[in-house]
Image (cartoon, rainbow, N blue to C red):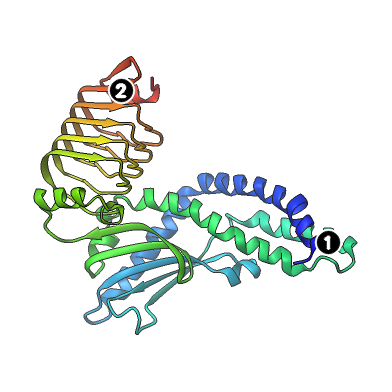
Amino acid sequence: MNEVEEKFLEETVEPIFDDYKKEIMKKLLGNKDKLKKQVLNVLRNIADKANKIENYKVKYIDFSLLQIQFLRETYEVTAIAYDENWYAGEGIWEVFSIDYIFEELKEIKSKLYKDIKKYVGKIRPFCIEQYILKQIPIFNNFFTYFLINWLKQWDEEESFKEMPKTNVIQITWGEYKNNLQKVFSYEFSIKTEDMFKKIIEGNKPEDMIFSTWTGLQASNIIIEDNDISCMSLKESNLKNLYLFNCIGVGLNFKKANLKKCHFKNCDLGASDFAESILEEVIFENCILRNMNFKGAQFKNVYLRSGSRQKSILKEEDLLYLI
């Protein structure tokens, strides 16, 4: 890349895409129901196809934005399911278009191609294409945020129940066979309190992030200075749980029973406490953005911030945080 191209990308292209990224997020928010429906339809189709293959059990499902389709302006996503022999087969393929998310990109590219003509060959169209491709990982981060939220309760969907799968199933989103980020994980196995405490004592985020502890019965647990994001404690019964200085984004506490629990200095954004029972629970100096408390029951639940304290009696009380 020559000096003229670098200056053009920095002064002209970068500001345009800084604004465009905000528009992509708005598009995702405005079309989230449509995109969610597409994703769930794809998972249902994969389940149907897997059921038609003898002894086939899905282990991985990878969603990928295709770079080549970006250059062709078709904006397609592939979803490929693999069994345990993922290295030996082509998997089960599904493809769907999300051109409604990126429809303004065609206009931006067209304008930039016109702008470089005045440089009389000093700026190649190739450098614009490469710049756009480098934005795909950023776009992928936007998509993963939504999928993590949507798939948190996928185990309640018919497509999950009907899909033949291994004891551990994992879904990722990213570039095709590259830079994939986990958005869902589920493990079918009996989990005990001793196993949970051993994982906590091991203090390894890779063992805790996206781990499944559905229906866990446990008490007297301290988790400190760790990342337990997207851990599922759905339908669990927890007493004397202390969570300090932790990243707990996207936790799943749906239908859980929490008693005498304390969350302090934790990021709990996008966590799900729907239909849970919270008794003698304290959230102290915690980030509680985009959380779901729908149908939750509160008894002696408090928000603390410095010397201030607020009693939570119903979900609406969380709309106006102290």
**Front residue of this view, candidates 124 and 162:** 124
Q: Is residue 64 left or right of residue 99?
A: left
- Tell me, yes or no, whether the two marked residues, 1 and 2, touch with CB atoms within 8 Å: no
**Whole-percent x and y of residue 144?**
44, 54
* As drawn, 111 above or below 74: above
Q: What count of labels does the image hold?
A: 2
* Mark 2 crowd level (few <14, some 14–19, many ≥20, 10 Å Cα): many
Task: Residue at 55%, 46% (x, y): give it.
Answer: 25
Q: Is residue 153 left or right of residue 242?
A: right
For the point 35% across and 70% down, the residue is: 46
**What amino acid does circle 1 point to?**
Ile
Mark closer to the chain start, 1 or 2: 1
Q: Which residue is mark 1?
A: 116
The image's mark for residue 262 is none
Find numbered disc 2 in the image and state the secondary structure of the residue it sits on: strand
Residue 239 makes an appearance in the image = yes
Amino acid type indicated by mark 2: Leu
Q: Residue at x 67, y 57 (%)?
A: 105
Which quadrant, please, contains the C terminus?
top left
Residue shown at the point (11%, 42%) measured from the top left: 218
Q: Position of residue 187 (x, y in %)?
A: 21, 60
Position of residue 123 measured from the top left corner of the image (x, y, whole percent): 81, 65
Q: Residues within 10 Å of mark 1 (few under 14, many from 20)?
A: some
Q: In the rendered image, which quarter is residue 310 located in?
A: top left
Secondary structure of residue under mark 1 = helix
Q: Determine if residue 99 is in view.
A: no
Query: Distance of mark 1 from mark 2, alpha carbons?
Result: 55 Å
Q: Which mark is residue 303?
A: 2
